[in-house]
Image (spheres, rainbow, N blue to C red):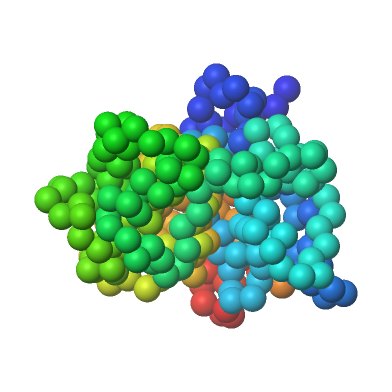
Amino acid sequence: MVQKDSYITEGSPYGIYKLRVEGLNLYYGTKQALKDISIKIAPNTVTAFIGPSGCGKSTFLRCFNRMNDLIENVTITGSVMVDDIDIYKNMIDVYQYRKKIGMVFQKPNPFPKSIFENVAFGLRINGESSKSVLQGIVESALRQAALWEEVKDNLNKSALTLSGGQQQRLCIARAIAVKPSVLLMDEPASSLDPISTAKIEELIYQLKDQFTIVIVTHNMQQAARVSDKTAFFYLGELIEFDKTDKIFTNPSKEATQNYITGRFG
């Protein structure tokens, strides 16, 4: 019988784990970027990927929404299970699948449209045309992203007029408006000031009640603050994956200890 961690949501329709990866290898041509990665991620948790630049953490993150498919000469072996469906081996509609996986990138990337239309964009693509429905979902997403009070009187203004931190929260609102089951974040606060970073971190903590969140970060203090579990990557390998407090106070691997104490990286 598999033991559940204390924070794993009871009654998950997909059993204990939302995401399961077994024996994943990824190659760019003949160069191997990811080596035999296996990991299990529980629903409604925040998982942080840490490690030095070029260690494979962002590449691995993109495996969950099949963005690596867009790169030439990429070969992937092993299994990536999302809601108990192998997203590489099953005949899935990748376009439809990606709608279930929200993505927030390192730099805010709002569209050159109004604040309202940025959030409504994915809904319109999915066929929603009711003005009242769009208004309700846009307001809800902006509230969830802790941005509504700041923009509610300026929804028709260009999103490009917002500050960097506001733009990033708008991108989060855009991602969650279509109600994905997983939210991927690749260095979401690395280009932001400390105050905006704190707002993003607080938002991540709040959103895990509704989403399974995976975040890549170079900021180890950030990983310690926001995540339930932390995975340390090095040279394309998953060195250690455990509860965040254990990773930062009593890691099992010497390489993890050396990295978090600043001896390399």
Q: Looking at this view, name the residue that lies furthest to the right.
A: 30
Q: Is residue 10 left or right of residue 206?
A: right
Q: Quadrant of the N terminus?
A: top right
Q: Which residue is pictured at 64% across the width and 25% down the height?
A: 15
Rendered location of residue 168, percent (x, y): 34, 61
Residue 13 lies, in percent from the top left, at: 60, 22
The relative height of residue 151 versus residue 158 in the rendered view (above or below) is above
Q: Quadrant of the C terminus?
A: bottom right
Q: Residue lying at the far left in this picture: please name it.
A: 153
Does residue 217 show up? yes
Q: Nearer the viewer, residue 23 or 173?
A: 173
Residue 136 occupies quadrant: top left
In the image as oriented, which residue stretches furthest toward the bottom? 264
Q: Nearer the viewer, residue 18 or 231?
A: 18
* Side (left or right) of 30 relative to 118: right
The residue drawn where x is 32% and y is 61% is 113
| Coordinates of residue 98 in the picture (x, y in percent) | 60, 47
Residue in the foreground of this view, choosing between 200 and 168:
168
Work out whether residue 202 can be spotted. Answer: no
Q: Foreground: 245 or 179?
A: 179
Residue 99, quarter of picture: top right
Q: Examine the rendered structure and indicate whether residue 86 appears above or below residue 196.
A: above
x 59%, y 76%: residue: 53
- Residue found at x 70% / y 27%: 2
* Residue 161 image offset from top left, x and y in percent: 22, 68
